[in-house]
């Protein structure tokens, strides 16, 4: 396929970053553009693509577990975009997308005028293009050079694929995968911490799927010789940030405590529910599903405090905090004082009034 794309004039475009990513339809979050704007935008994009003499199509998938992945069809006016996006998606069998009941569609309009957004009162202020994801329509639109913003593309694809993955029995989580010996461990941590130790992870990208068949990555990893599916995790490690001295450096949690801290995603005074800046699935439902997985598979749960001291540990220092949890050589969770517990309760009870009684600090 690569040689055919090169024959069509495809070139490797230098990666860019920071383009606007507009998402509509996330759970409980304000949409960044309206349903009417989405309809008008899609109409303009389809009209543009249909006017191009050569159209390029590529099929792939988000997630490496065929039973609970999200099939994707890319329709592009540029062979270079297909070349770039083929590295973001997992390969999928021929006709798998055509036979799928709810595939995602990526529309690439690299040659469309970037001023067309103003005609539908949409001004994302992207000089090289923008990314628009509509969860309800299962579609992602990439204008200009947006296909080269791999981080932004993955953010948009994660948003639109989460509901489909859930519907197929998968549990999409904003976690990283750490392999220790023959065991898989899920790691939830602040982005700065993750980036400092990314070389020790299977992938630096956020996004895994946990199912009865095992653990899979949302997107292909840089290690092409690695497995596509890993075992069900033996442990999860939740990294929180607390400089008040309330949270211990490392401790073991019960499944109910793990679900509670996962739902909170506490980071030094702020909360990032389910460790995601914007999930398309109800965070409380994700936390409930995670609790069920923890119990069903007897997965060990741990909490590490990455801000127990004035200087937050990074890289190898952070991994030294995580290492003892892999051998379960940590004490049970015993916080100091009640201030932080009350802060958790105040936030979570207001945001999630129907939180189960079994969830606990």
Image (cartoon, rainbow, N blue to C red):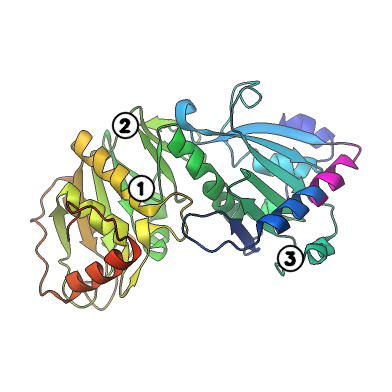
- Which residue lies under the disc numbered 1? 286
Is 36 above or below relative to 172? below
117 to the left or right of 260: right
What residue sits right under mark 3 in the picture?
122
10 Å neighbourhood of mark 1: few (<14), some, or many (≥20)? Answer: many
For residue 181, what is the image quadrant?
Answer: top left
Q: Quadrant of residue 10?
A: top right
Task: State the residue in front, 332 or 118.
Answer: 118
Q: Earlier in the sequence, mark 1 or mark 2?
A: 2
Residue numbers of the magenta segment: 44-54
Q: Contact (CB < 8 A) between labels 1 and 2?
A: no
Taking the spot 53% from the left edge, 50% from the top edge, the residue there is: 159
Residue visible at 17% across and 76% down in the picture: 339
Q: Confirm or deny contact between disc 1 and disc 3 (CB under 8 A).
A: no
x 32%, y 60%: residue:
352
Query: Does residue 358 appear anywhere in the picture?
Result: yes
Q: Which residue is mark 2?
A: 231
Predominant SS of the magenta segment = helix
Query: Crowding near pointer 2: few (<14 within 10 Å), some, many (20+)?
Result: some
In three-dimensional space, the C-alpha distance between marks 3 and 2, rounded to whole angstroms, equals: 44 Å
Q: Residue at x 53, y 42 (%)?
A: 161
């Amino acid at each position: 396929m690569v040689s055919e794309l090169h024959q069509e004039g495809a070139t490797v475009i230098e990666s860019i970053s920071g383009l606007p990513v507009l998402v509509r339809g996330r759970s409980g979050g304000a949409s960044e553009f309206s349903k009417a704007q989405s309809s008008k935008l899609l109409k303009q994009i389809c009209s543009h693509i249909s006017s191009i003499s050569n159209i390029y199509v590529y099929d792939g998938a988000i997630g490496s577990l065929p039973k609970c992945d999200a099939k994707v069809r890319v329709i592009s006016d540029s062979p270079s975009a297909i070349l770039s996006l083929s590295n973001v998606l997992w390969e999928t069998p021929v006709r798998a997308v055509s036979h799928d009941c709810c595939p995602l569609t990526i529309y690439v309009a690299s040659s469309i005028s970037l001023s067309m957004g103003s005609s539908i009162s949409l001004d994302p202020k992207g000089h090289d293009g923008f990314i628009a994801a509509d969860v309800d329509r299962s579609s992602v639109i990439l204008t200009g050079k947006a296909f080269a913003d791999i981080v932004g593309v993955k953010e948009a694809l994660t948003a639109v694929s989460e509901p489909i993955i859930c519907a197929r029995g998968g549990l999409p989580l904003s976690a990283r995968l750490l392999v220790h010996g023959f065991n898989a461990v899920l790691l939830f941590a602040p982005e700065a911490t993750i980036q400092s130790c990314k070389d020790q992870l299977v992938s630096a990208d956020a996004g895994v799927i946990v199912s009865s068949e095992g653990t899979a990555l949302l997107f292909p990893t840089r290690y092409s010789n690695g497995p596509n599916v890993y075992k069900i995790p033996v442990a999860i490690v939740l990294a929180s940030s607390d400089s008040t001295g309330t949270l211990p450096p490392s401790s073991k949690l019960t499944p109910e405590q793990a679900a509670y801290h996962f739902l909170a995603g506490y980071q030094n005074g702020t909360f990032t529910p389910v460790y995601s800046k914007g999930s398309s699935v109800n965070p409380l439902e994700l936390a409930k599903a995670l609790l069920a997985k923890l119990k069903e598979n007897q997965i060990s749960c741990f909490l590490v405090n990455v801000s127990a001291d004035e200087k937050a540990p990074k890289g190898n220092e952070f991994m030294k905090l995580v290492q003892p949890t892999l051998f379960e050589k940590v004490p049970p969770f015993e916080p100091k004082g009640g201030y932080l517990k009350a802060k958790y309760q105040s936030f979570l009870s207001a945001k999630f009034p129907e939180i189960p009684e079994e969830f606990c600090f």
